[in-house]
């Protein structure tokens, strides 16, 4: 639907912004962006994957693993 496409575009912007923040080492800012977006749509796997990257870079391996697993699970359910 057009609503889903609109949400995808919005999360694409969040993903790009967060990716940039991660590359700059601004993990706290990226985390805030991603958590806000994931709260709005907890079923979007890209957001969980990027949160996993943030946590991994911050040395929070257990939290990273949970986010990566959640992303994988969400993608698997869509198939």
Image (spheres, rainbow, N blue to C red):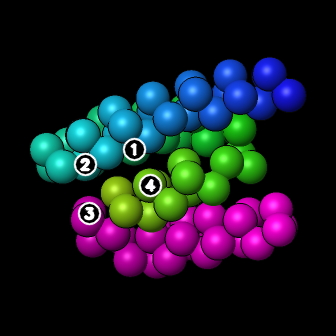
- Do the residues bearing badges 2 and 4 touch, measured as CB atoms within 8 Å? yes
Question: Sequence order check: which comes first, mark 2 or mark 4?
Answer: 2
Residue 12 seen anywhere in this rendered image of the structure: yes
Query: Can you say which quadrant of the picture contains the C terminus?
Result: bottom right
Residue 15 position in % (x across, y down)? 44, 40
Prevailing SS of the magenta stretch: helix
Q: Which residue is mark 3?
A: 58
Question: Sequence order check: which comes first, mark 1 or mark 3?
Answer: 1
- Do the residues bearing badges 1 and 2 touch, measured as CB atoms within 8 Å? no
Q: Which residue is mark 1?
A: 31
Residue drawn at (31%, 45%) of the image: 19
Query: On the picture, is 48 further left or further right than 13?
Result: right
Q: Which residue is mark 2?
A: 22
Residue 71 position in % (x across, y down)? 62, 64
Question: Sequence order check: which comes first, mark 3 or mark 4?
Answer: 4
Residue drawn at (25%, 48%) of the image: 22
Q: Which residue is mark 4?
A: 50
């Amino acid at each position: 639907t057009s609503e889903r496409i609109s949400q995808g575009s919005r999360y694409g912007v969040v993903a790009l912004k967060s990716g940039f923040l991660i590359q700059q080492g601004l993990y706290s800012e990226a985390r805030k962006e991603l958590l806000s977006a994931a709260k709005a749509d907890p079923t979007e796997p890209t957001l969980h994957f990027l949160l996993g990257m943030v946590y991994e870079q911050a040395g929070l391996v257990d939290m990273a693993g949970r986010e990566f697993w959640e992303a994988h699970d969400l993608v698997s359910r869509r198939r």
